[in-house]
Amino acid sequence: MSTKTIIGVFEDESILLKTLRTLKSNGVNIKDIYGPCADHDLLKEFTRESRLPYVSVLTGLFTILATFAFIYYVSVIDYPLQYGGKPVFSFPPMVVILFLVCILVTGGVSTFAFLGREQMYPGKNPELIDPRAADDRFFLVLDQNFNPEEIKGWLKESGANEIIEKDNDE
């Protein structure tokens, strides 16, 4: 099945942001935005809130609890050592271990969760809509869920430098 996409080429991200707001208010399906750099206003307007911070917090809490349980089990239940009149279980030295293990495990889980969600893996070919997207232009990729001439008109009047219509074979 062949579908068509309309691509608007912009040189300035502020014009792209204004266009993005206009198109979203008119109900146009926006597939993606390609550009040479990340713009926080564009990301906030285009994407939804990430669930990655929630994964990181839950992983950190679970890691702290699991590490505490393991250290407690080893030092008090399984192999208690009495030396120099010190208590078998002492919490202050554990704080450093809990902190470092929490950072290590949470960082690893967060990294792999992000890579899995974005489907990034070694050897994957980059998916650029146009080679200029990595240099100096911003590309706004749209679905044709409206009259294509109406979408092109909105892009032209909002300040797109170039409008490209592309066939995608799925």
Image (cartoon, rainbow, N blue to C red):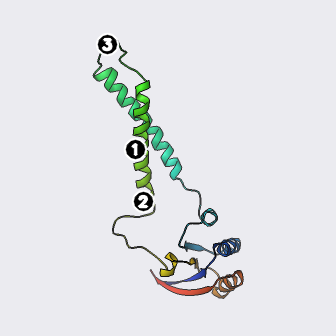
Q: Which mark is residue 76?
A: none
Residue at numbered disc 1: 104
- Mark 3 vs mark 1, foreground winner is 3
Q: Mark 3 and mark 1: span between their CA atoms? A: 32 Å
Three-letter amino acid code of the residue under disc 2: Leu
Quarter holding the C terminus? bottom left
Q: Mark 3 and mark 2: span between their CA atoms? A: 49 Å
Q: In the image, is 119 to the left or to the right of 136?
A: left
Q: Considering only order in the chain, which callout, 2 or 1, is on the residue closer to the N terminus?
A: 1
Residue at the image point whose x is 61% and y is 74% from the top: 29
* SS for callout 3: loop
Q: Considering only order in the chain, which callout, 1 or 3, is on the residue closer to the N terminus?
A: 3
Q: Considering only order in the chain, which callout, 2 or 3, is on the residue closer to the N terminus?
A: 3
Residue at the image point whose x is 29% and y is 18% from the top: 81
Residue at numbered disc 3: 84
List x then y, in percent, for residue 88.
35, 17
Q: Is 112 placed above or below 30 here?
A: above
Q: Residue 115 carries which label?
A: 2
Three-letter amino acid code of the residue under disc 3: Gly
